């Protein structure tokens, strides 16, 4: 918990709105393996981290919404009944949540809200889902709406669809809301059934290496990949096979019905089917303490994301190749939607400082960019802070 940030958020709230707020937090996430599988009804293995978005909030008697982003030093005003997307980026993640509550028949009044956080933006740690979940969680508590955690995650996902225009899956908000200290979440994105998997790391740590780039094609390419996967399912359906998603599609079906028709769609779908298999093997390995096999599957995941799914970039590939033959690193891969952000690495604890030092120099020389590193600490999901 970032106590300094919580204190300053509360003080700024009081100065701005003249009352003491309640404060809530919702964390960012890592994903150990299972990328671009969530919107294909497959499995993912995320975990909530100790970096979070914090919101201060107080209810109002009228219908007005007063928002303030401490990070951007900017305010925004709206009304509960008429929320709509704005040209400013950050208010959309809050207003979209209000819109979802309206559409689902949850009754709220106006409110004052400020927000801040320590989830690095654009690093692929899902700061936007953390905002949506922190806001939905806070409104649920303040207005006693009785919404269950899973629905809060769905509200976060829908907000991305409607107010940010990215057709994301359920993974990020689910991890933010449902996270458990010291555990990953093995989530079946078809049924939303899940189990907590203890992260027993035996002297290894989860190290995130931030490329500090976010290429602008991320959102458009994300939606394109989604459409390509849907096209693959359509081709299988046209061959007379009933399949609702890639979850019900096998490699044999892809080879027979998709490969001859569309090579690009075939490669995308092949990645997804194989990534699901990799996740299941990796998760079993993690459960029996076999971190080596987990690591191998992570490298396999990266290779598929880079070569078949084509959502990596030169900076991410550079960081994975730089550690691939290092005996202190069991596995590495790009994490999240792609085109920038972090790689996730399983690294021997005592080797971390030396590795980061060495990579910072190499990365600067090769890419002209600073590399930032962060050891992920796995925390609980959304909670009330005060
Ligand atoms: C982004 C999305 F928000 C997730 O839903 C998921 O698809 C991920 O990219 C890729 O695995 O983080």
Image (cartoon, grey):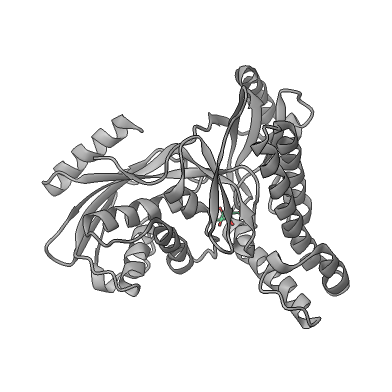
Image coordinates for residue 365, horizontal then vertical, percent? 69, 28
Image coordinates for residue 328, horizontal then vertical, percent? 71, 23
Which is nearer the eye, 62 or 76? Answer: 62
Q: Residue at x 79, y 61 (%)?
A: 267
The tally of labels here is 0
Identify the image quadrant of the N terminus. Answer: top left
Identify the image quadrant of the C terminus. Answer: top left
Q: Residue at x 74, y 59 (%)?
A: 273
Q: Residue at x 63, y 55 (%)?
A: 43
Say above or below: 284 vs 162: above
Say above or below: 146 vs 384: below
Say above or below: 5 vs 232: above
Left or right: where 222 falls relative to 54: right
**Quadrant field for ligand 1:** bottom right
Which is nearer the eye, 117 or 340? Answer: 117
Image coordinates for residue 317, horizontal then vertical, percent? 72, 41
Q: Is residue 378 visible?
A: yes
Q: Is residue 71 visible?
A: no
């Amino acid at each position: 918990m970032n106590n300094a940030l919580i204190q300053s958020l509360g003080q700024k709230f009081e100065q701005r709105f003249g009352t003491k707020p309640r404060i809530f937090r919702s964390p960012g996430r890592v994903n150990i393996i299972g990328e671009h599988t969530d919107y294909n009804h497959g499995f993912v293995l995320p975990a909530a981290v100790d970096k979070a978005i914090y919101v201060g909030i107080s209810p109002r008697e009228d219908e007005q919404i007063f928002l303030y982003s401490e990070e951007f030093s900017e305010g925004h005003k709206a009304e509960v009944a008429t929320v709509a997307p704005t040209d400013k980026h950050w208010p959309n993640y809050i207003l979209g949540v209000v819109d979802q509550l309206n559409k689902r028949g949850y009754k709220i009044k106006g409110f004052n809200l400020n927000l801040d956080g320590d989830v690095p933006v654009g690093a692929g740690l899902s700061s936007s889902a953390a905002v949506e979940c922190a806001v939905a969680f806070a409104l649920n508590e303040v207005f006693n709406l009785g919404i269950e955690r899973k629905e809060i995650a769905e509200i976060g996902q829908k907000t991305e669809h409607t107010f940010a225009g990215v057709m994301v899956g359920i993974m990020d908000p689910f991890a933010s809301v449902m996270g458990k200290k010291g555990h990953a979440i093995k989530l079946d994105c078809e049924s939303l059934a899940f189990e907590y998997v203890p992260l027993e790391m035996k002297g290894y740590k989860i190290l995130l290496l931030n490329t500090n780039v976010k290429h602008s094609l991320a959102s458009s390419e994300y939606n394109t990949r989604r459409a390509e996967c849907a096209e693959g399912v359509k081709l299988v359906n046209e061959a007379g096979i009933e399949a609702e998603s890639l979850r019900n599609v096998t490699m044999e079906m892809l080879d027979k019905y998709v490969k001859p028709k569309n090579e690009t769609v075939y490669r995308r779908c092949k990645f997804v089917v194989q990534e699901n298999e990799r996740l299941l093997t990796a998760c079993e390995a993690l459960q029996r303490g076999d971190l080596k096999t987990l690591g191998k599957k992570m490298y396999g995941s990266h290779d598929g994301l880079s070569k078949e799914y084509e959502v990596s970039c030169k900076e991410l590939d550079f960081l994975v190749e730089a550690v691939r033959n290092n005996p202190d690193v069991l596995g590495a891969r790009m994490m999240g939607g792609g085109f920038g952000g972090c790689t996730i690495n399983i690294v021997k604890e005592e080797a971390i400082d030396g590795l980061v030092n060495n990579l910072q120099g190499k990365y600067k020389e090769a890419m002209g960019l600073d590399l930032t590193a962060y050891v992920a600490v796995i925390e609980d999901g959304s909670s009330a802070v005060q």
